[in-house]
Image: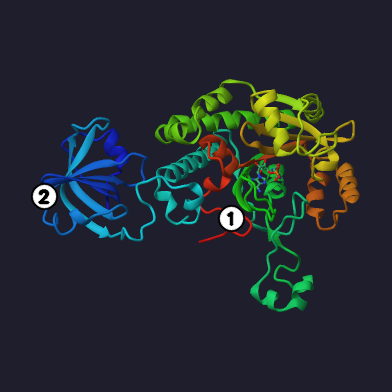
């Protein structure tokens, strides 16, 4: 069925135009001789007001029984609206009720619902203003990511969801087995007989495969779902999340940091420019001062410090952190947030972490206790990007793998990239949901993805 988008009608369409809309009723208010219907079609945050006159054939039998959530197809004429705050309204010629929503049972009533409650009805929550807005913003940022990289001449690579390489080596992979293997314990343990001939899992990162293509196409990116069996119940962890991972040949750590900073500023500017109405809602109801925060980030250089400087800053803060700080420990969320929210009040790029707390593929620095890593920390969240220059020297990489106990035979293909035409190269991973959290001000990451998956929770 062809219908008009409410977004277009409210903005551009001329008064007097015959229009058709298809959407869901938000509210009905009766007056003498007619009813006001507020209808939303999801194309934008705003509803359009529809005037339903008592002359309509189904006025008494249907229109006066309409409740929140009913789906409607409305034909009518766009007219100038006498009401404040809206340019136009529709005077209906016909209203077809496509689907009823029993008010006794429909859980979304006009009042505000808590996000915790809405998570329990994840199949209905996109119909709320806030979650509908997040979905539109998410879609826009995803589009802007592709636009940014295509403008820069990057090629998108579809890296696999099922893989035999645990990129991060943190033991957080979900294993992939067939139902038959599950029934047959003997086959499950006998790896050679398993479906893929060796132990396979869901990817934790597309980086290693992106490196393959960077070593052929120069600048590439992969953007897709990644999976981590972390038993984290925090407001910034998901078991399934999307990661954007650019990877560039002939690019060192500083070129990598420049790209990440430029990209983040591009994405923030783009969403403010294209999702103004939704962003204003978040600024008003979700995080006061959100838009000012985003402008501040776009207008200022990110601060760049080394891990060693970060540790010094934390030590001299005099704070009583839950996790004590000393050189060599991984930075926790509380440390990251102190640095970016209080010490520097800007996004921060922390570089040169101890090799002992970072994965095997990061390039060893000359010192040689640190690696050419870089994490980007932002206020309110902490780490949003993790990246590094990759170890391009065959012998050093092999030595590191042996030291950590990684089976070099399983990674011959990865070592080959260093054996044949190696290049200094680097890349990073942006946690897409953490970026949406930062942009929308949503407190919990579970509100930033259509169907969150966390330990003990995966409805739909
Ligand atoms: O720092 P991470 O683990 O980096 C990598 O996976 C690299 N292989 C990326 C690369 O260099 N190509 O993860 C990257 C980002 C983090 O900074 C964080 O934003 C996000 O992914 N992230 C998560 N987001 C939600 N839930 C989780 N459980 C996450 N774990 C990481």
Return the disc, 1 or 2, that comes first in the chain's sequence. Answer: 2
Which label belongs to residue 54?
A: 2
Q: Which residue is drawn at 24% across and 41% down?
A: 49
Nearest to the observer: residue 24 or residue 210: 24
Whether residue 247 is visible to the viewer of this picture, yes or no, is: no
State which quadrant residue 17 falls in.
Answer: top left
Left or right of 135, for residue 375: right
Residue 318 percent location from the top left of the image: 78, 26
SS assignment at label 2: loop
Which label belongs to residue 70?
A: none
Q: Which residue is drawn at 60% across and 20% down?
A: 300
Q: Residue at x 70, y 50 (%)?
A: 209
Residue 69 percent location from the top left of the image: 32, 54
Nearest to the observer: residue 199 or residue 309: 309
Left or right of 8, for residue 76: left
Residue 265 percent location from the top left of the image: 57, 28
Which mark is in front, 1 or 2? Answer: 2
Few, some or many residues within 10 Å of mark 2 (<14, 14–19, 20+)? some
Tell me if residue 276 comes above or below residue 246 in the rendering: above
Whether residue 280 is visible to the viewer of this picture, yes or no, is: yes
Nearest to the observer: residue 459 or residue 272: 459
SS assignment at label 1: loop
Which quadrant of the figure shows ligand 1? top right
Whether label 2 lies within 8 Å of ligand 1 gets the answer: no
Residue 378 percent location from the top left of the image: 64, 32
Give the CA separation, mark 1 to mark 2.
48 Å
Which residue is outermost to the left? 55
State which quadrant residue 346 falls in.
Answer: top right
Which residue bears the numbered disc 1?
A: 453
Left or right of 211, for residue 442: left
Nearest to the observer: residue 379 or residue 315: 315
Which residue is outermost to the front? 320
């Amino acid at each position: 069925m062809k219908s008009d988008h409410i977004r277009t009608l409210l903005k551009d369409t001329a008064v007097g135009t015959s229009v058709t809309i298809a959407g869901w009723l938000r509210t009905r208010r009766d007056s003498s001789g007619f009813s006001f219907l507020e209808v939303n079609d999801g194309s934008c945050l705003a509803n359009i007001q529809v005037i339903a006159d008592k002359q309509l054939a189904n006025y008494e039998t249907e229109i006066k029984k309409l409740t929140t959530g009913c789906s409607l197809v409305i034909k009518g004429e766009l007219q100038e609206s006498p009401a404040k705050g809206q340019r136009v309204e529709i005077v209906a010629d016909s209203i077809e009720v496509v689907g009823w929503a029993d008010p006794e049972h429909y859980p979304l009533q006009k009042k505000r619902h808590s996000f915790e409650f809405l998570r329990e009805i994840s199949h209905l929550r996109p119909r709320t203003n806030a979650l509908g807005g997040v979905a539109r913003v998410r879609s826009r940022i995803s589009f802007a990511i592709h636009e940014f990289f295509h403008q820069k001449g990057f090629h998108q690579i579809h890296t696999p969801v099922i893989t035999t390489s645990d990129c991060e080596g943190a033991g957080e992979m979900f294993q992939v087995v067939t139902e038959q293997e599950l029934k047959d314990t003997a086959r499950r343990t006998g790896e050679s007989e398993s479906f893929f001939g060796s132990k396979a899992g869901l990817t934790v990162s597309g980086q290693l495969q992106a490196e393959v293509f960077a070593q052929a196409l120069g600048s590439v990116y992969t953007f897709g779902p990644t999976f981590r069996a972390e038993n984290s119940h925090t407001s910034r962890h998901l078991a399934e999340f999307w990661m954007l991972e650019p990877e560039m040949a002939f690019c060192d750590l500083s070129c990598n940091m420049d790209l990440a900073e430029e990209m983040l500023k591009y994405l923030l500017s783009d969403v403010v420019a294209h999702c103004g109405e939704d962003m204003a809602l978040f600024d008003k109801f979700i995080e006061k001062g959100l838009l000012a925060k985003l402008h501040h980030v776009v207008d200022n250089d990110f601060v760049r410090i080394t891990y060693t400087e970060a540790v010094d800053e934390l030590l001299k803060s005099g704070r009583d952190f839950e996790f004590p700080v000393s050189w060599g420990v991984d930075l926790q969320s509380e440390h990251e947030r102190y640095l970016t929210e209080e010490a520097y009040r800007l996004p921060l790029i922390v570089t040169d972490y101890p090799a002992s707390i970072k994965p095997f593929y990061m390039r060893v620095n000359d010192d040689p206790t640190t690696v050419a890593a870089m994490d980007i920390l932002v206020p309110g969240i902490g780490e949003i990007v993790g990246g590094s220059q990759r170890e391009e020297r065959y012998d050093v990489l092999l030595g590191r793998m042996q030291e950590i106990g990684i089976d070099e035979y399983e990674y011959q293909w990865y070592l080959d990239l260093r054996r044949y035409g190696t290049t200094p190269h680097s890349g990073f991973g942006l946690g897409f949901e953490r970026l949406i959290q930062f942009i929308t001000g949503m407190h919990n990451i579970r509100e930033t993805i259509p169907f969150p998956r966390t330990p003990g929770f995966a409805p739909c």
